[in-house]
Amino acid sequence: MSDTVNEALLSRLILAEKVARAGGEKALEYFHHRDTLVVETKYDLQDVVSRADREVEQMIDQQIRAQFADDGFLGEEYGLQEGTSGYTWVVDPIDGTSPFLNGMPNWCVSVAVLHDGVPVIGVIFAPTYQECYVAALGQGATLNGRRLQVDPSRTLQNHVTGFGANSHVSPAEVGKILASLLEAGGNFIRIGSGALMLAWVAAGRVVGYYEPYMHAWDCLAGYCLVKEAGGWYHPFNTEGERLLKGAQVLAVAPGAEADLKRVAGI
């Protein structure tokens, strides 16, 4: 990595953590007053959004624009603004809006940076836990400053796997996937935030995470974290319009990679 690229990466990494933390603190204020929020639906009745999501995304976008006006920006709530620098920020202001609105702690702010289509920065801040996961290409991954490294001795059979699904996936397919996972000797949990569960893969709290249909803003920060912690992820197509489409998401520690790929049909 050249000094110029390294400097560009480092400056964006510093900002990524700053905006994730600031966004998380703003979201936390709304969380403590969530009964006052008007809840709207998007794709279906389970796909919810509130003013908190929109205002946190706007705040993050404005702070990024102030420092890197030529960078692209993709947010869950307001879509894609293309840039010219080769860098694109991919942000989910509140991943886990349903847990957020229902008073559960399992939600986070997810901030990724792509360079030429590759996730080179990933920051996930979980305000209710006061945990900040940070990673950058070639720099490793940390949780509140502590280095993360996945444990190769953990497998599908001796650990737990994270799983998520939504209405883009049929109930029959969900049942088939979970049956395959259980038949392979595994077990699973679901917490309502795919981004946070990807961070948990990097932290070793789950051995892997699989979701049959997920968007870029949900997974790219977590992908960077998992890779830098020594895990593997299934590539997400970031070319052109594909960046805006959902796709299979899988990230896993080495000891469970083969088994979880079979479960996912990858």
Image (cartoon, grey):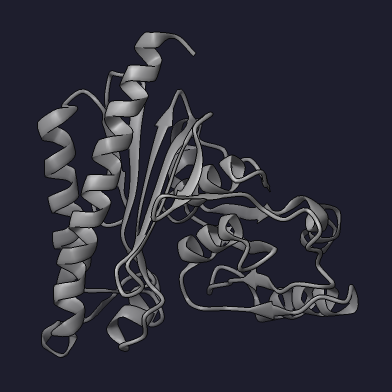
Q: Residue at x 32, y 70 (%)?
A: 42
Q: Is residue 62 left or right of residue 247?
A: left
> How many marks can you see?
0
- Using the image, determine if residue 19 lies above or below residue 119: below
Camera-side residue: 152 or 234?
152
Q: Is residue 30 left or right of residue 177?
A: left
Q: Residue at x 45, y 47 (%)?
A: 221
Q: Residue at x 81, y 75 (%)?
A: 186
- Using the image, determine if residue 231 lies above or below residue 70: below
Q: Position of residue 4 (x, y in %)?
A: 35, 10
> Would you say residue 265 is visible in this rendering?
no
Camera-side residue: 129 or 208?
129
Residue 33's image quarter? bottom left
Spot the residue most to the front.
146
- Using the image, determine if residue 11 lies above or below residue 40: above
> Would you say residue 101 is visible in this rendering?
yes
Q: Position of residue 94 (x, y in %)?
A: 31, 65
